[in-house]
């Protein structure tokens, strides 16, 4: 059973997506999507990466709402996936898209400054 953490992480992502999009009524939680769940090999801690549409304030507010709902989400995950031991949920903002956009801007700026280094 070497792939159990990966399978469980995928199932958790699916369930958390459904819960966040449809069952949380906290007004702090904006337009958010669960992008990834990383489950530690011992399966005690789950790092949940969330992408939030909006500015920094909206992102922080949504993250605070998710952290406040952690107990509810954990109990729902336990019952839906029939887990005896439910991992601790740790929410983090997924900033990969922002980093990629920033990198693209830097590359574009570099190309403008040094056109002689571009490949044909």
Image (tube, rainbow, N blue to C red):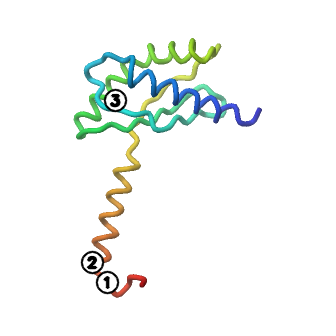
Q: How crowded is mark 1: few (under 14 residues within 10 Å), some or many (20 or more)?
A: few
Q: Indicate the position of residue 47 as horizontal and vertical percent values.
A: 50, 33
Asked whether, in this view, residue 92 is left or right of residue 1, the answer is left
Q: Indicate the position of residue 83 as horizontal and vertical percent values.
A: 63, 16
Give the residue number, with chain letter if any, for mark 3: 63
Give the residue number, with chain letter if any, for mark 1: 115
The C terminus, quarter of image: bottom left
- Secondary structure of the residue carrying tag 1 is helix
Asked whether, in this view, residue 74 is left or right of residue 55, the answer is right
Mark closer to the chain start, 1 or 3: 3
Q: Indicate the position of residue 18 as horizontal and vertical percent values.
A: 45, 24
> Disc 1 vs disc 3: Cβ atoms closer than 8 Å?
no
- Secondary structure of the residue carrying tag 2 is helix
- Secondary structure of the residue carrying tag 3 is helix
Kindly identify the residue that appears in the image at 32 percent across and 25 percent down. 64
> Disc 1 vs disc 2: Cβ atoms closer than 8 Å?
yes
Mark closer to the chain start, 2 or 3: 3
Between residues 57 and 25, which one lies in front from this camera angle? 25
Q: How crowded is mark 3: few (under 14 residues within 10 Å), some or many (20 or more)?
A: many
Which one is in front in this view, the residue at disc 1 or the one at disc 3? 1
Between residues 56 and 118, which one lies in front from this camera angle? 118
Give the image quarter of residue 72.
top left
* The label number, if any, that marks residue 112 in the structure image: 2
Kindly identify the residue that appears in the image at 27 percent across and 77 percent down. 112
**Numbered label tally:** 3
Which one is in front in this view, the residue at disc 2 or the one at disc 3? 2
Marks 2 and 3, Cα distance to the nearest angstrom?
Answer: 38 Å
Q: Indicate the position of residue 22 as horizontal and vertical percent values.
A: 39, 20
């Amino acid at each position: 059973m070497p792939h159990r953490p990966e399978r469980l992480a995928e199932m958790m992502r699916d369930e958390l997506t459904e819960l966040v999009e449809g069952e949380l009524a906290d007004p702090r939680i904006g337009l958010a999507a669960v992008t990834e769940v990383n489950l530690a090999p011992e399966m005690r801690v789950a790092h949940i990466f969330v992408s939030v549409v909006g500015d920094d304030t909206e992102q922080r507010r949504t993250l605070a709402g998710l952290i406040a709902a952690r107990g509810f989400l954990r109990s729902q995950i336990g019952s839906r996936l029939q887990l005896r031991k439910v991992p601790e949920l740790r929410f983090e903002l997924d900033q990969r898209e922002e980093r990629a956009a920033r990198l693209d801007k830097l590359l574009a700026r570099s190309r403008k400054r040094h056109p002689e280094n571009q490949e044909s």
